[in-house]
Each structure stands twice: as C-alpha cells, then as structure tokens.
Image (cartoon, coloured by chain):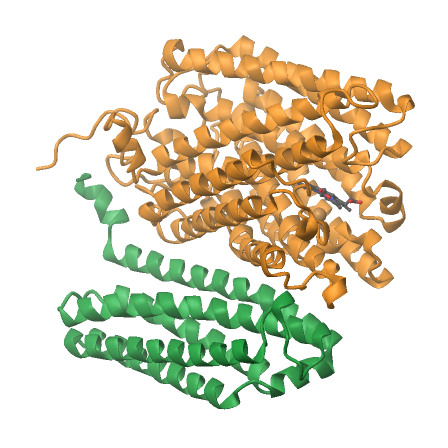
Chain colours: A green, B orange
Amino acid sequence: MPPEAVTGHWGSEGARRQAAYLGMWVFIATEVLLFAGLFTAYGVYRSVYPEVFRAAQLTMNVGLGTLNTFLLVTSSVLVALAVHAVREDRPGLGGVLLLAAALLGVVFLGVKGVEYAQHVKDGGLPGAAYRFGEVPRVGASLFFTLYFLLTGLHAVHVTVGVGVLTVLGVRSAGGAFGAESATPVELGGMYWHLVDVIWLFVYPILYLS
Amino acid sequence: MSPPAAESYLTDGRTLWSWLTTHDHKRIGLMFLGLTLSFFFLGGVFALALRIELLTPGRTIMGHLAYNRMFTLHGVTMVWLFMIPAIPSAFGNFLVPLMIGARDVAFPRLNLASVYLYVLGASVTLWGMFEGGADTGWTFYTPYSTTTGTAVLPVLLGVFIIGFSTILTGLNFIATVHTLRAPGLTWMKLPLFVWAIYGTSIIQVLATPVLGMVLVLVALERVVDAGIFDPARGGDPLLFQHLFWFYSHPAVYIMVLPSMGVISEAVSAFSRKNAFSYRMVVYSTLGIAFVGFFTWGHHMFASGQSTFGSGAFGAMSMLVAIFTAIKIFSWMGTLYRGSIAMEAPLFYTLGFMFFLFFGGMIGVAYATTSLNLHWHDTYSVVAHFHFIMVGATVMAFLAALHYWFPKMSGRCFPGRLANGAAVLIIFGFIATFVPQFLLGNMGMPRRYADYPPHFQSLHVASTAGASLLAFGFVCIAGYLAWSLRYGAVAGNNPWGSEGFEWKSASPPPTHNFPVTPEFPTGPHEYAREEVPHAA
Ligand code: HEM
Ligand SMILES: [Cu+2]
C-alpha cells in the first residue's frame, strides 16, 4: 500500500467517482460517434434515393419494431428505478429490477430474431445477397445493408448490456451495493439508457416514414 | 504496516510477469515506448526498401505489386503503429500523472488493456503483412480497397483494434486531467505538455470511432459485397473519402499536437524561461483541436466537390495555420534572450520549428484550390506531409526521448555524440525531402515505382538523404542503449528544469510521490538567476 498522504488524494472516493462518471460520459460520446458514421451514411443515401427508401421502409414490420421500442423503454425505466432503489439502500429490490430489465433485453433480442428470420425468408438481405422483388434493387440493397448494420450493431450493444445488467443484478441482490457504493449500478444504468436512446433514433428512421 | 516503497518503478518487481500485469502508468508508458520504437524500425526498413527501388528508373529490387504493398505497409505502420500512439501513449502515459502530481492515471487497468489491444491490433496487421499485405495505400480508398485481391481485411481489422487502444488511452487522459490534478493545480497552471495531450485526447475520442465505423463498412463491402461505396450498386465512393478524412485530417493533429507539447516543454527548459504567452498557447491548442474537424475537404479538391465547399474548406484550413503560427511565435518569444543550453533536445526542437514552419506554409499553399490542383497526388504532397509528420512528429519524438531519457532511466547519455547525431538527422531529413518537393512540382506522381530517366538525379539525392537519416538513427540507438548501462547517473534533475515532472525522483518510485505534491508556482517558472546546469 502507498503511504496515507498519497491515497488521500488519489484514492479518495470522491475523485474516483468523478473519474468514473467522466469516463462513462466520454465513452458514451464515442459510442454515439460510432453510430454517427452509420446515421450519416443513412442520411446521404436517403437523400439520394428518397422513393426507394420510403418504399423499403413500408416493408418493415412496424408492429414488431414498436413492440421492441416499448420493451426497451420499459426496461430503461426499470433500470432507473433500480438505481433509485440502490441509492435508497435497498439493493435487493434493485437487483430484482435489474434482472427484470435484463430479461426485457433478452425478449428484445428474441423479437429482433423473429424479424431477421422474416427478412431472410423475403430475401431482404444486405448487399449482393439482396433478392427482395418488391423494391428496386439499386438503393434498396443499400437500405437493407444499413438496416442490418444499424440494428445489428445495436443488438451487439443490447447483448453486452444484458450481460452487464445481469452481473449487476445478481451482485446487487447479493447485497454488494448500497447507498455508499452505488457507482457501478449508476454506470451500468447510464450504459443501458444509451442503448435505449440509440434505439429511439434507429426506430423512427428505419420503421416510420 | 506497508513495506517501504521500492527505490524506483524499474526495480519494483523484476520479473517479466510483474511487467505484463503492471498497472503503473510509467511501466505502461515504457512498454508503449518499446513497442512503438520497434514499429518505427520496421516502418523505416520498409521506407529504405522503397527508396532503393526508386534509385534507378525501371525495376531495381522489386516489382510493381511488391512496391504497392511496400508503401502501404510503410504508411500503415508509420501512421497507426508509430506516429499516432508514440508520443501520447508512451510519453503521455509516463509523464502526465507526474506532471499533475497524481499517483497514476484514472483507470490503470484500462490503461493496461490499451497496451494489449495495441499488441493485438499490431499482430493482426503484421499477420496481414505476412499474408502478402494490402496494396491500397494507408488511405484505403474505395472502390479499389474493396475490389483488390490483396490482404486488406486483416490490415483493416488491425487498424480497427488499434483504434480502440487509442480511444481508451484518450479517455483515460481526459478523466485523469479532469479529476486527479494535485490540490491547487488549476487548469491555467497545467504544463503545456499536459494541455497538448488533453487536446489530443479529445480529438482521439471524437474522431476515432468514425474511422472504426468506416473501416467496418469497407470490410463489410469486401465480405458481403454490400455496395455502400460501390457506384455499380448505387453506393458512392466519395462517401468513403468524406468519412475517412473526417477522421484522418484530425488524425494529423493527433500526430502533431503532442509534438507541440513536447516542444513547448523543451523550449522552456533549454532557454530557462517561462513559456511566452502561455494562455495563447493553450487556446491555440484547443483551437486546433476544434477547427481540425472542419478541414477534411481540403483532401478532396480534385474530387469534383462544389467550388463553395472547396473555398470553405480552404479557409478553415488556413485558420489552423494561424493557430500553429501562434505557437511558433510563442516558442520564438520564449527562446528570445533566454540562456540557451544547446543540448540534443534543443537541436531537435529547432529542427522541428523549421520543418513545421516550412511544411505548414506549403500546407497553406495546398489549401488554395488552384495550387492544389497542380500538386495534388504528386510527390510534393509526399514531401509536405513528411515535412510535417516526420519533420515535426519524429523530431519532437527524438526531442522527448532525449529530454526525458534521464527521467525514465536515471542515466545520462553522451552529450556531444547526441548533438552530432541530431545534426546528422536534420541534414539527412532535408536531403531526403526537399528533392521530393521539386520532383512533385515537375510532375512526378506519388505511389509510382517507376519514372522517366530525367527524374533520376533528384531521386538519387532523396535516397542518399534517407541513408543519412538511417545512419543517424543507428547512432542514436547505439548510444542510448550504451547509456542505459554505462551512462553517468543522472540525479533527480540533470537539466535543472522547472518542469513539474522533475519534482519526483529520477527514475520515479512506483507511486511517484511520497506525499501529495504542491505546485505553488506556474509551470516552467524560472528564477531570474542562473540555475546550475549539468553537462
Ligand atoms: C500541422 C500538421 C499537418 C499535418 C500532420 C499534415 C499532414 C498531411 C498529410 C498526411 C497529408 C497527405 C494525406 C494523403 O496521404 O493524401 C496532407 C495533405 C494535405 N495537407 Fe497537410 N498536414 C498538416 C498541416 C496542414 C496545413 C496547416 C494545411 C493547410 C493550411 C494543410 C493542407 C493540406 C492539403 C490541402 C493536403 C492535400 C494535398 C493534396 O492531396 O492535394 N496541411 N497533410
Ligand atoms: Cu488534412
């Protein structure tokens, strides 16, 4: 262990919390920029092929997309409640809420899988594999490529998030967190809200026109 | 009770394992230094091979495909494996916590992870090289990069992974500078090197994800033939260029901003004066970091973008030049009437200032559409960016290596030998790249293995210069390796510098300071009278 005087500055709980928060915000900024590249590509091609993109959007399963939006928003609310519970020193309740949110994430992924299966059946695949007769190939294959990229990358984030929430939920239920040590739950919550917010951009541009 | 602290971070645990699992920012910095130096060597070998091929017209030592692969590997290694990480990841890691009076960076484990990510990315890239290597150039322009049959995928993947390493390092520095400054160390007292690393980190964090995404898109294009950048499928290759340069223009400032930080430190230390107009230097650092994001279009003047776009991008580019000029004035103002100590770091500093000025002025000329169209994709572009990237980054890297060598190793190096090598390097550099400006102006295109005979004399001059450079590097490697063992023991502050990092022992102990340090004065504040100076 280093001498006390040094820990007093570096190791102080306040400085560590502040660093963790800032780190998370910066990380969130990089995540947003990662998606920004895809949103840019989407915007560019939508302005190049406005009709084709609108036609392609009409073939999306709005019902399932909306269901997924509902699932994610609900789970985000649960996570917010979990953070609140842990701050109030009720880690048991927090753990249950976190696990419930993770479960909704799993359902989200299941619904996504159903949608993907439908696209595969229709031939609405990315790039060269595209063979969906209803919409002209040039432009529509780009739409579907971007659709799969955006939702796929988002699904990767959901998967990671489910893992994070599960670990946090189990540990919280075991009493690992509390009013004094809520930071991991707060950070995990921030990550999950990010996943939610990104979906709130992905959903309208892909499903609604 | 805790055992007494070990004498220095170097002796605290001597096993290989203690290095591979360390969370000590100094050891991590040193590991990055070793890694980046190895890739600098590799990239240098590729460069010499290129220069030898260009010694005579026609085939000299390799065919055209081999040449294309060679310059791609040279570019990829130098840009992503050496220049981007070299100063921030190696020197930044070592020095930033020392300079702000912290015990370590904010996220030590993340820091170690970034070393491993770098190693992983570098290995994947190397693997691609052994698979034959890509032949696209470091810019991976589509549609060529999506259709060529060479090993583009592993190189893309490697660069993608290295990008993550860069992001983690940047994230770590931002959090460190914000939250771990010693009590009383306000923002306007931060050493200029810390400011430079901070500005660089912001660029890294904001720009690198976009590069990551565009690399994924190219990879996808190769794997599933997605068509995003392929006009035949409705895509647009120019979108690639926009996204690529949105990252890569700021990336050139990722390479040059840390250098500017090193130079600010060295100028103060070797003229024994406080930095001239400190605040302006800080603001110009932030200005460069900001404006750098709005200049990418100056790489696309020849792509058919609108005249208005070209004009706007040109004007924004010139703004960067103004911020750079502010820094150059500050360094000159600091040197003016200082008590100058002509040590090796100052030689490199002066070289840096000259090359940055010269290369930057040429950059301003390029930002003028009409001149750009004459020089675009000729050797003079090659000369411009080597003037800036080699002339600035490598010079600053050498300045840093010499200035902080005693801090890191606790040893001094032979001063006269170092000065001789510095002169050699600077002359070798001029001899290598000035002929390339002339070649470009005469119409020699870049990325060609062959040329008509009347270009030969200038190519021979350039290759001769490159050999001189290489010899200079061998000398440096020789005496530094020698000094690690046999150099005179440095003592805590051999240069008599007022930089904050010298307030800890040299080499520093594991947790940097026995008690939280206080920095009552501003950075680099020199007393009026002479401080005794080591040879
Ligand atoms: C300060 C650090 C700078 C660095 C590290 C740098 C680096 C580079 C690099 C690497 C390239 C070549 C890219 C390629 O492979 O195609 C380049 C080209 C260019 N640079 Fe710079 N540059 C710097 C400053 C400037 C400034 C201040 C300006 C303008 C005011 C400028 C204007 C240009 C232009 C217009 C080109 C494109 C030339 C062409 O392809 O026709 N640069 N620079
Ligand atoms: Cu540029």
Image quarter in which the C terminus of chain A is found = bottom right
Residue B128 image point, x, y percent: 55, 39
Q: Residue at x 70, y 22 (%)?
A: B429
* The quarter of the displayed image where residue A55 is located: bottom right
* The quarter of the displayed image where residue B519 is located: top left
Q: Residue at x 85, y 40 (%)?
A: B375
Q: Is residue B101 visible?
A: yes
Q: Nearer the viewer, residue B364 or A91?
A: A91
Looking at the image, residue B286 sits to the left or right of residue B61; the answer is left
Image quarter in which the N terminus of chain A is found = top left
Residue B358 image point, x, y percent: 75, 33
Q: Indicate whether A150 appears above or below B349.
A: below
* The quarter of the displayed image where residue B311 is located: bottom right
Q: How many marks?
A: 0
Q: Nearer the viewer, residue A185 or B444?
A: B444
Looking at the image, residue B438 sits to the left or right of residue B130; the answer is right
Q: Indicate whether B496 appears above or below B363.
A: above
Residue at the bottom extreme, as displayed: A63
Residue B471 image point, x, y percent: 62, 13
Residue B165 image point, x, y percent: 45, 47
Q: Residue at x 77, y 51 (%)?
A: B298
Q: Is residue B528 visible?
A: no
Q: Nearer the viewer, residue B396 or A79?
A: A79
Q: Residue at x 40, y 25 (%)?
A: B407
